[in-house]
Amino acid sequence: MPATPVRPPEYRRREPEKEPLYQILAGHPETFLQHTRTSEHRLPLQVEKEMRAYLDCGILAYGFVRARCEDCGASRAVAFSCNKRGFCPSCCGRRMADTAARLLDEVLPALPEHRLPALRSSLLHPRAHVRSKKSVSDRGRVSLES
């Protein structure tokens, strides 16, 4: 039986203008920012910049690149992203996936679990406890208690 050719997933443009967070912030951004400027807990300037960049992220009107397939000749407009770290759910998710892939492929060696160096116990498991300072510094072992 011949194998069915695998088609790559079709590109679907992310539509941030349909997301609830975007709708709330885009409706009255200046009113929101003015309210935070007059309250006790003012937003840091970096947060304001990230919020403004999020409102432009993925919107074709704020910039795009036209991508064309060399095989079939189809072309698409791909909107620019903000590439920020703290506000945009799409860019944060992409950064998280890229970081996880890099950790698995390049940083963490392919060793058995008992050979991994001791990591901060809270990163491994919420109930992870280090046996003793001596064992961590001498052998790099971590004990997980359930």
Image (cartoon, rainbow, N blue to C red):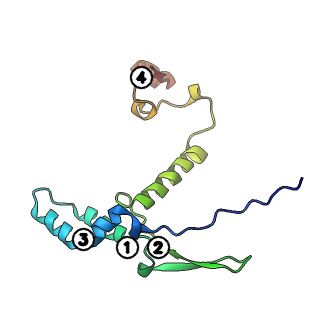
Task: Quadrant for residue 146, please give it.
Answer: top left
Q: Which residue type carries mark 1? A: Asp
For the point 58% across and 78% down, the residue is 76
Dot placed on the residue nearer the N-terminal end, 2 or 3? 3
Placement of 61 over or under 136, stated as above or below: below
Q: Quadrant of residue 33?
A: bottom left
Residue linked to disc 2: 80
Q: Tell me the residue at 75%/59% (across/down).
A: 6
CB atoms of marks 1 and 3 within 8 Å:
no
The residue that disc 1 covers is 56
Residue farthest toward the right in the current orientation of the protein: 1
Label 2 or label 4, whichever comes before in sequence order: 2
Q: Do labels 2 and 1 touch, CB within 8 Å?
A: yes
Within 10 Å of the Cα at label 1, are there few (<14), some (14-19), or many (20+) other Cα atoms? many
Q: Is residue 58 visible?
A: yes
Mark 2 vs 1, N-terminal side? 1
Q: Which residue is mark 3?
A: 29
Q: Mark 1 or 4 closer to N-term?
A: 1
Mark earlier in primary sequence (1, 3) = 3
Cα distance between the residues tagged 2 and 1: 8 Å
Residue type, numbered disc 2: Phe
Badge 4 element: loop
Q: Which mark is residue 130?
A: 4
Image check: 115 left or right of 4? left
Spot occupied by residue 115 in the image (x, y as percentages of width and height): 58, 28
- Circle 4 crowding by C-alpha within 10 Å: few under 14, some 14–19, many from 20: some
Q: Amino acid at mark 4?
A: Val
- Alpha-carbon distance for marks 4 and 3? 47 Å
Residue 91 numbered tag: none
